[in-house]
Amino acid sequence: MRDYFVYILASGKNGTLYTGVANDVLRRISEHKQELTKGFTSRYGVKRLVWYEAHMTARDAIQREKNIKHWSRAWKIALIEKMNPTWRDLFDELL
């Protein structure tokens, strides 16, 4: 069994959002936090893990990511706040 993760990062509460997918979520979030890959998250300071969800298959995780990316901002915020109403960084909970 291998877990694949869909995740949402934020620059802060109600800030800029980024939705991604990874098979090694700790490594991938660390890369975002350290700005190892230049792009959207490093440009906008999007480093706080505010929501995540595990999936059994890569196909399911990728489909969920695509669905979330098409959602309105309000729906994404509602999803985050259902799991994480204070928008705390959940990264340490995964360690």
Image (spheres, rainbow, N blue to C red):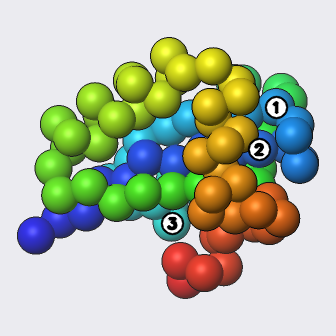
Report the residue marked by disc 1. 16
Give me the C-alpha separation between circle 1 and circle 2: 5 Å
Residue 43, located in which quarter of the rendered image?
Answer: top right
- Give the image location of residue 88, x and y in percent: 80, 67
User: Which numbered circle lies on residue 26?
Assistant: 3
The answer to whether residue 34 is visible is: no
Tell me the residue at 67%/69% (across/down). 90
Q: In which quarter of the image is the C terminus?
A: bottom right
Looking at the image, residue 19 lies above or below residue 40: below
Please provide percent x and percent y for residue 86.
83, 65
Task: Of the two numbered discs 3 and 2 on the same chain, state the one appearing first in sequence.
Answer: 2
Residue 65 x %, y %: 41, 33
Give me the residue at 29% from left, 42% from top: 61
Q: Earlier in the sequence, mark 1 or mark 2?
A: 2
**Depth-wise, is mark 1 or mark 3 nearer the camera?**
1
| Vertical comparison of 23 with 62: above or below | below
